[in-house]
Amino acid sequence: MRCLLLTTPMKKRYLKKLISTTLLFILLIDSFAYAKQIDVRPDDNLQNIIEHSENGDIIHLQDGNYNGNLIIEKSITLTGTHQAKIIGNRDDNTIKIMADNVTINNVSIYHSGLDLSVQNSGVFINKNTKNVVVKNNRIEDNLIGVYLWGSIDSLVEGNRIIGQKFHRINDRGNGVQVWNSPGSIVTHNHISYGRDGIFTTTSHNNEFTYNYFDNLRYSIHYMYTRNSTISHNYSVKNKIGYALMFSDGLTVENNTSVNDIERGIFSNFMNKSTLTNNIVLGPCKKGLMLYNSNYNTMKNNHFEQCDIGVHYTAGSQDNHFSGNSFIQNHTQVKYVGTKYLEWSTDKKGNYWSDHVAFDLNTDGIADAVYRPNAITDQILWRNSNTKVLLNSPAIQILKWSQSYFPALLPGGAQDSYPLLKPLFTIDYASVLSKQPEDFIK
């Protein structure tokens, strides 16, 4: 059983952001002599009150409905309870933030516009704004839940984001969308419906941690993003858990994928990244797919009950596998190629549940090399019509020949130091019973 704990670097960074945000808030309050709390009723003109507020003011909404399409150009806090509902008119953004040091806290936000061409959002954070906080809100039935459009050091934390259900999934917006927003953190949110849970493109130095995702296309979708962290997230019954595309320098650790339909982790043109201590539990079609991904490290991950444990294809090279567990996958590895791939590091390989071997010197390493692919596998993958010959005498002779003459092996992945048991034991009851409440603060 894994404890959901922040790693030391993440903890330091999160605490630094928390401290800096707190200090900025204190300085703002201290700097503006006229900063005050303003209590607002549903029949007041909220936009007018925002426009006449001062930097540092706290605008407290009483329970009730408020007209949306708000524009915030002051460093204010907008807060209330979830019964304070800001409702857009299905045109443009429900709330648009144009200033630094704005906080939207503990309210409900509904009904943005539905135009993907202009990225209508429940909360739209404009470019070059800094230190915006969107925290503990209910954000429902908007095209995009929260859009970080070029903001810096934003924090999206503890929100319940429910996207649309009535469009085709590709016509919906994302729960949280990030474009060129360095230093931003998305953490402890429950995101469901819509298109992707978190979609990030052309950004860097972001952290997506402790989020719960369900009923989505992709839980987390990376495009052209560098030097970022995906950690301790939970994806259940989505099409793909973690889609990592055209990105470098990612740290992907301690994430869980449960019953995601197509792939637990999909790495497409992902390079120089590290995947460690992730769990993929099927049924799913592919636990991990590496497509033209290079110079990555896959260490201490767990792939179980998938049609294919790892699909390794399209020129991927110089990837390092060790300490991983491949358990009861129908096909442990699918690799179509003639190059030999060694999947062990420093005489430490992986655990393969279908590998039957002795360990005469009791060092925990099997005495026989594990080779997951045979000539017949290669033939079947290249031409699926040959499945009709699977039990033919010719195929049986080919299998027998290969078992006695290893030189006939066509290349592929091999593990020269396969482990006799997994490196860690999973508490299945704990993993499978996780609920959104376990992740939202």
Image: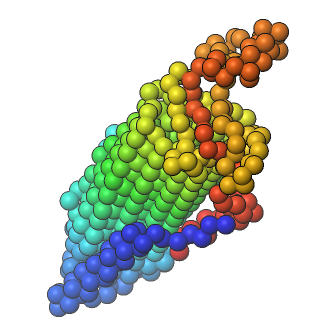
Q: Is residue 386 above or below residue 142?
A: above
In depth, the one of 151 and 160 nearer the eye is 151
Residue at (83, 9) in percent of width and height: 393
Q: Where in the figure is residue 8, as x and y percent of width and height? A: 42, 72
Q: Which of 244 and 304 is in front in this view?
A: 304
Image side of residue 366 versus residue 131, left or right: right
Vertical position of residue 140 compared to residue 378: above or below: below
Q: In this view, does 379 lie above or below 29?
A: above
Visible residue check, residue 214: no
Total numbered badges shown on the rendered structure? 0
Q: Residue 355, position in %: x, y? A: 73, 40
Q: Where is residue 125 in the image (x, y as percent from the top left)?
A: 30, 59
Quadrant occupied by the N terminus: bottom right
Q: Which residue is drawn at 64% across and 17% down?
A: 408
Q: Which residue is at 38% across, 81% downward?
A: 60
424 relative position to 391: left or right: left
